Amino acid sequence: VTATGNNTCVALGGFYDSGYTVYAGTSGINSGFARSINSGATFAQTAFICDDLLSISDLAVSPVYSEDGTMYMITIGNSGNSILWQTTNGGTTWDAVLTAGQVITPPSGSATTVGHFNKVALSPRFASDTTLFISESGNAPNIWRSTDNGFRFSPLPTKTGTTGSIDSWAIVSSKKILVGDSAGNFFKATDSGKTWSQAMATGLSNFSSMAISPDYDHD
Protein backbone atom coordinates (compact mmCIF):
# COMPACT_ATOMS: atom_id res chain seq x y z
CA VAL A 1 0.00 0.00 0.00
CA THR A 2 1.46 3.35 -1.01
CA ALA A 3 0.81 6.55 0.96
CA THR A 4 2.14 10.08 0.42
CA GLY A 5 2.78 11.14 4.02
CA ASN A 6 6.09 11.12 5.84
CA ASN A 7 5.05 9.23 8.98
CA THR A 8 4.80 5.44 9.13
CA CYS A 9 4.37 3.41 12.31
CA VAL A 10 5.28 -0.28 12.30
CA ALA A 11 4.61 -2.98 14.90
CA LEU A 12 5.66 -6.64 14.92
CA GLY A 13 3.18 -9.36 15.86
CA GLY A 14 3.48 -13.10 16.34
CA PHE A 15 5.06 -15.70 14.08
CA TYR A 16 2.84 -18.03 12.07
CA ASP A 17 3.36 -20.61 9.32
CA SER A 18 3.72 -17.97 6.62
CA GLY A 19 5.96 -15.64 8.63
CA TYR A 20 5.74 -12.82 11.15
CA THR A 21 2.68 -10.62 11.39
CA VAL A 22 3.57 -6.98 10.75
CA TYR A 23 1.24 -4.01 11.27
CA ALA A 24 1.77 -0.62 9.62
CA GLY A 25 -0.05 2.70 9.90
CA THR A 26 0.66 5.36 7.26
CA SER A 27 -0.20 9.04 6.93
CA GLY A 28 -1.19 11.23 3.99
CA ILE A 29 -3.23 10.55 0.87
CA ASN A 30 -4.17 6.89 0.43
CA SER A 31 -3.09 6.17 3.99
CA GLY A 32 -4.50 3.53 6.26
CA PHE A 33 -3.85 0.62 8.57
CA ALA A 34 -2.37 -2.45 6.92
CA ARG A 35 -1.40 -5.96 7.99
CA SER A 36 1.14 -8.45 6.65
CA ILE A 37 1.17 -12.14 7.58
CA ASN A 38 4.34 -13.00 5.64
CA SER A 39 7.00 -10.90 7.38
CA GLY A 40 6.23 -7.78 5.35
CA ALA A 41 6.51 -9.32 1.87
CA THR A 42 2.96 -8.16 1.10
CA PHE A 43 0.44 -6.02 2.97
CA ALA A 44 -3.35 -5.92 2.95
CA GLN A 45 -4.93 -2.61 3.87
CA THR A 46 -7.60 -3.29 6.47
CA ALA A 47 -8.92 0.22 7.13
CA PHE A 48 -8.90 3.67 5.54
CA ILE A 49 -7.85 6.62 7.64
CA CYS A 50 -7.40 9.42 5.09
CA ASP A 51 -9.16 8.48 1.88
CA ASP A 52 -8.54 10.43 -1.30
CA LEU A 53 -11.52 9.09 -3.22
CA LEU A 54 -13.49 11.40 -5.49
CA SER A 55 -14.86 9.16 -8.24
CA ILE A 56 -14.72 5.67 -9.73
CA SER A 57 -13.43 5.63 -13.31
CA ASP A 58 -13.57 1.91 -14.11
CA LEU A 59 -14.43 -1.50 -12.70
CA ALA A 60 -13.48 -4.99 -13.91
CA VAL A 61 -15.09 -8.18 -12.60
CA SER A 62 -13.48 -11.63 -12.68
CA PRO A 63 -15.00 -13.99 -15.29
CA VAL A 64 -15.47 -16.46 -12.42
CA TYR A 65 -16.64 -13.89 -9.87
CA SER A 66 -19.14 -16.30 -8.30
CA GLU A 67 -16.18 -18.52 -7.36
CA ASP A 68 -13.37 -16.07 -6.52
CA GLY A 69 -15.23 -12.85 -5.58
CA THR A 70 -12.54 -10.83 -7.37
CA MET A 71 -12.97 -7.31 -8.75
CA TYR A 72 -10.64 -4.45 -9.64
CA MET A 73 -11.61 -0.78 -9.38
CA ILE A 74 -9.91 2.47 -10.37
CA THR A 75 -10.65 5.53 -8.28
CA ILE A 76 -9.63 9.14 -8.79
CA GLY A 77 -8.88 11.33 -5.78
CA ASN A 78 -9.09 15.05 -5.10
CA SER A 79 -5.34 15.12 -5.60
CA GLY A 80 -5.80 13.77 -9.14
CA ASN A 81 -4.13 10.47 -8.26
CA SER A 82 -5.57 7.32 -9.80
CA ILE A 83 -5.51 4.21 -7.62
CA LEU A 84 -6.14 0.58 -8.55
CA TRP A 85 -7.96 -1.45 -5.90
CA GLN A 86 -8.53 -5.18 -5.62
CA THR A 87 -11.08 -7.20 -3.68
CA THR A 88 -11.17 -10.99 -3.45
CA ASN A 89 -14.21 -11.23 -1.20
CA GLY A 90 -16.93 -9.55 -3.22
CA GLY A 91 -16.16 -6.00 -2.07
CA THR A 92 -16.11 -6.56 1.69
CA THR A 93 -12.51 -5.34 1.83
CA TRP A 94 -10.29 -3.66 -0.78
CA ASP A 95 -6.51 -3.50 -1.19
CA ALA A 96 -4.71 -0.70 -3.03
CA VAL A 97 -2.37 -2.44 -5.49
CA LEU A 98 -1.15 0.40 -7.74
CA THR A 99 -1.02 4.18 -7.56
CA ALA A 100 -0.21 6.71 -10.27
CA GLY A 101 3.24 8.12 -9.69
CA GLN A 102 4.80 4.85 -8.56
CA VAL A 103 8.18 4.10 -10.11
CA ILE A 104 8.41 0.49 -11.30
CA THR A 105 11.51 -1.30 -12.54
CA PRO A 106 10.52 -4.44 -14.50
CA PRO A 107 12.77 -7.56 -14.39
CA SER A 108 14.05 -6.57 -17.83
CA GLY A 109 13.93 -2.87 -18.57
CA SER A 110 14.47 0.54 -17.03
CA ALA A 111 12.55 2.29 -14.28
CA THR A 112 9.24 3.74 -15.50
CA THR A 113 6.81 5.99 -13.66
CA VAL A 114 3.17 4.91 -13.77
CA GLY A 115 1.13 7.72 -15.29
CA HIS A 116 -2.47 8.60 -14.54
CA PHE A 117 -4.60 5.61 -15.56
CA ASN A 118 -8.33 5.24 -16.12
CA LYS A 119 -9.02 1.80 -17.59
CA VAL A 120 -8.70 -1.73 -16.21
CA ALA A 121 -9.54 -5.03 -17.92
CA LEU A 122 -9.02 -8.71 -17.16
CA SER A 123 -8.05 -11.56 -19.42
CA PRO A 124 -11.04 -13.80 -20.26
CA ARG A 125 -8.90 -16.62 -18.85
CA PHE A 126 -8.15 -14.71 -15.66
CA ALA A 127 -8.94 -17.73 -13.48
CA SER A 128 -5.93 -19.57 -14.94
CA ASP A 129 -3.57 -16.86 -16.25
CA THR A 130 -4.27 -14.23 -13.49
CA THR A 131 -3.59 -11.47 -16.04
CA LEU A 132 -4.97 -7.93 -15.96
CA PHE A 133 -4.21 -4.73 -17.83
CA ILE A 134 -4.46 -1.02 -17.07
CA SER A 135 -4.26 1.80 -19.59
CA GLU A 136 -2.93 5.26 -18.91
CA SER A 137 -5.01 8.24 -20.00
CA GLY A 138 -3.79 11.01 -22.28
CA ASN A 139 -2.01 10.84 -25.62
CA ALA A 140 0.35 7.98 -26.56
CA PRO A 141 -0.33 6.15 -23.28
CA ASN A 142 1.43 3.15 -21.81
CA ILE A 143 -0.49 -0.07 -21.25
CA TRP A 144 0.60 -1.98 -18.14
CA ARG A 145 0.16 -5.70 -17.56
CA SER A 146 0.23 -7.89 -14.47
CA THR A 147 0.37 -11.68 -14.71
CA ASP A 148 0.05 -12.30 -10.96
CA ASN A 149 -3.29 -10.78 -9.88
CA GLY A 150 -1.90 -7.23 -9.74
CA PHE A 151 1.05 -7.91 -7.43
CA ARG A 152 3.58 -6.75 -10.04
CA PHE A 153 3.08 -4.63 -13.17
CA SER A 154 5.24 -4.03 -16.23
CA PRO A 155 4.59 -1.74 -19.22
CA LEU A 156 4.02 -3.54 -22.50
CA PRO A 157 7.23 -3.61 -24.57
CA THR A 158 5.93 -1.12 -27.15
CA LYS A 159 3.09 1.38 -27.29
CA THR A 160 0.19 1.01 -29.70
CA GLY A 161 1.49 3.62 -32.12
CA THR A 162 -1.38 6.00 -31.55
CA THR A 163 -0.62 9.64 -30.87
CA GLY A 164 -4.08 10.00 -29.38
CA SER A 165 -5.71 8.44 -26.34
CA ILE A 166 -7.24 5.00 -25.95
CA ASP A 167 -11.00 5.39 -26.18
CA SER A 168 -11.88 1.71 -26.03
CA TRP A 169 -10.22 -1.68 -25.86
CA ALA A 170 -10.86 -5.40 -25.61
CA ILE A 171 -8.69 -8.09 -24.07
CA VAL A 172 -8.77 -11.33 -26.09
CA SER A 173 -6.21 -13.18 -23.94
CA SER A 174 -3.13 -12.50 -21.86
CA LYS A 175 -1.25 -11.81 -25.12
CA LYS A 176 -3.90 -10.44 -27.51
CA ILE A 177 -5.23 -6.88 -27.19
CA LEU A 178 -7.49 -4.76 -29.43
CA VAL A 179 -7.46 -0.97 -29.13
CA GLY A 180 -9.53 1.87 -30.60
CA ASP A 181 -8.09 5.38 -30.29
CA SER A 182 -9.45 8.92 -30.18
CA ALA A 183 -8.75 9.39 -33.90
CA GLY A 184 -10.94 6.45 -34.91
CA ASN A 185 -7.99 4.15 -35.61
CA PHE A 186 -7.87 0.47 -34.69
CA PHE A 187 -4.77 -1.40 -33.48
CA LYS A 188 -4.12 -4.95 -32.34
CA ALA A 189 -1.29 -6.91 -30.76
CA THR A 190 -1.04 -10.69 -30.67
CA ASP A 191 2.36 -11.09 -29.01
CA SER A 192 2.03 -9.49 -25.57
CA GLY A 193 2.47 -6.01 -27.03
CA LYS A 194 5.90 -6.61 -28.55
CA THR A 195 4.54 -5.47 -31.92
CA TRP A 196 1.33 -3.71 -32.94
CA SER A 197 -0.48 -3.66 -36.24
CA GLN A 198 -0.37 -0.54 -38.36
CA ALA A 199 -3.21 1.86 -37.69
CA MET A 200 -6.39 0.75 -39.45
CA ALA A 201 -8.60 3.76 -40.18
CA THR A 202 -12.26 3.00 -39.50
CA GLY A 203 -13.75 6.29 -40.68
CA LEU A 204 -15.12 6.87 -37.19
CA SER A 205 -14.34 10.04 -35.28
CA ASN A 206 -13.62 7.96 -32.15
CA PHE A 207 -14.65 4.81 -30.27
CA SER A 208 -17.23 4.65 -27.49
CA SER A 209 -17.04 0.94 -26.72
CA MET A 210 -15.73 -2.37 -28.02
CA ALA A 211 -17.02 -5.93 -27.60
CA ILE A 212 -15.68 -9.22 -28.91
CA SER A 213 -17.21 -12.61 -29.53
CA PRO A 214 -16.71 -15.17 -26.74
CA ASP A 215 -15.25 -17.37 -29.49
CA TYR A 216 -13.14 -14.62 -31.07
CA ASP A 217 -10.12 -16.85 -31.75
CA HIS A 218 -12.21 -19.11 -33.97
CA ASP A 219 -14.85 -16.88 -35.58
Image (cartoon, rainbow, N blue to C red):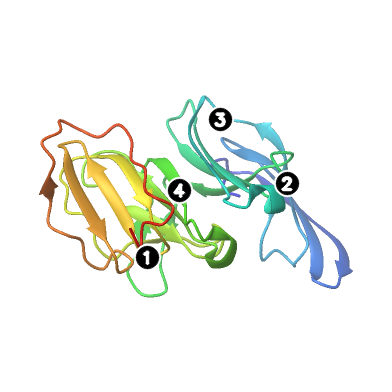
Structural distance between the alpha carbons of marks 3 and 1:
33 Å
Instruction: Please state which amino acid type lies under the numbered disc 1.
Output: Lys
Q: Are marks 2 and 3 in contact (CB under 8 Å)?
A: no
Is 32 situated above or below 107?
above
Mark 2: amino acid: Asn
Q: Which residue is mark 3?
A: 52
In this rendered view, identify the residue nearer to me: 180 or 112.
Answer: 180
Describe residue 28's horizontal placement relative to residue 178 as left or right.
right
Residue 71 appears left or right of 161: right
Q: Nearer the viewer, mark 1 or mark 2?
A: 1
Disc with the residue nearer the chain's start (4 vs 1): 4
- Where 197 sits versus 183, above or below? below
Tell me where residue 145 appears, x and y as whole percent.
42, 59
Nearer the N terminus, badge 1 or badge 2?
2
Callout 1 secondary element: loop
- Labels 3, 1: front one: 1
Q: Which residue is mark 1?
A: 175
Mark 4 sits on what residue? 121
Q: Label 2 belongs to which residue?
A: 89
